[in-house]
Image (spheres, grey):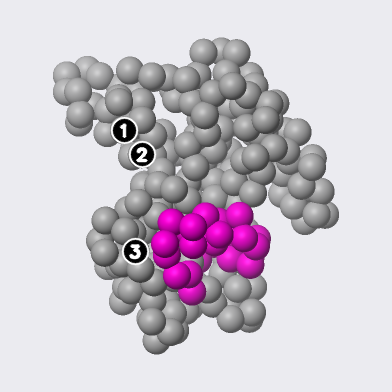
Amino acid sequence: MKTIGLIGGMSWESTVTYYEILNKEVAGALGGFHSAKILMYNVDFAELEENMSNGYWAGNAVILADAATRLEKAGADFIVIATNTMHKLVDEIQKQINIPILHISDAAADAVKCDNIRKVGLLGTKFTMTQDFIKSRLSDAGLEVVIPDDKDIELVNDVIFNELCLGKVLDSSRKEYQRIIDDMKAKGAEGVILGCTEIGMLIGDKDSCLPTYDTTIIHAKAAVKMALA
């Protein structure tokens, strides 16, 4: 079994889910008392959030590259960054290490295409929805991506940072997300990628008019597959 280098804490709420899935999937695959081999570096999300708010992405690249380097030196065989938004910095981080990074978008695209879906909605932070570091990767995989309008982008983003990252799960926000998913379905989306690792706390298949693809679950399962390959 390979050792997973997990960069967590963005936020720790979703990192808990990663840890649980990694161990349950390994136990399910190997049986007995097996659990995942994991090295984890948990960042202080306040530092990264401040850098994001100030547009100082270079500062976050330094923090995450340092985390990845420490995990590599400790014996990790590959890196899992437990958040969608920080995949904006994958190229910068990869330059500092010699082990691969398992990209969250590649895992999500594979899961969507397995269901023969070609047009998909994307929810996430405003960075994820408006910039190309996730969308272009999905497009390169052959998917057409639909995002909310500008007002709803701000709403989705506010719920993530002001509620979900703080462990708050509100029915009123769930209803707003459901409305936004309805709108994306009207635009032709056949499924929706929950492209922020906290959104699964709020929305799942039972809450959505479209099939949901929770990147936290998908990414963690892909990590186990890579660890056991």
Q: Residue 212 carries which label?
A: 3
Q: Where is residue 175 in the image (x, y as percent from the top left)?
A: 43, 77
| Front position in the image: 184 or 93 | 93
Mark 3 surroundings within 10 Å by alpha-carbon count, few (fewer than 14), some (14 through 19), many (20 or more):
many
Q: What element carries label 2?
A: helix
- Which residue is at 76% across, 47% downward? 57
Q: Nearer the viewer, residue 25 or 165?
A: 25
Is 67 drawn above or below residue 76 in the view shown?
Answer: below
Q: Where is residue 72 in the image (x, y as percent from the top left)?
A: 57, 18
Amino acid type assigned to the residue bearing label 3 in the image? Thr
Q: Where is residue 143 in the image (x, y as percent from the top left)?
A: 42, 65
Which circle's residue, 1 or 3, is located before the other in the chain?
3
Query: In this orientation, which residue lies closer to the viewer: 158 or 219?
Result: 219
Along the polypeptide, which appears first: circle 2 or circle 3? 3
Quickly name the residue at label 1: 225
Task: Sort mark 2 into few (<14), some (14-19) or many (20+) by Cα contacts within 10 Å.
Answer: many
User: Are the residues tagged 1 and 3 within 8 Å (C-beta)?
Assistant: no
**Does the image show residue 67?**
no
Instruction: Find residue 132 and report its horizontal and vertical position in percent.
Output: 62, 60
Q: Quadrant of the C terminus?
A: top left
Q: Do the residues labelled 1 and 2 touch (CB within 8 Å)?
A: yes
The part of the chain drawn in magenta is 123-146
Report whether residue 29 is seen. yes
Q: In this view, does 98 lie to the left or right of 188?
A: right
Identify the residue under disc 2. Answer: 222
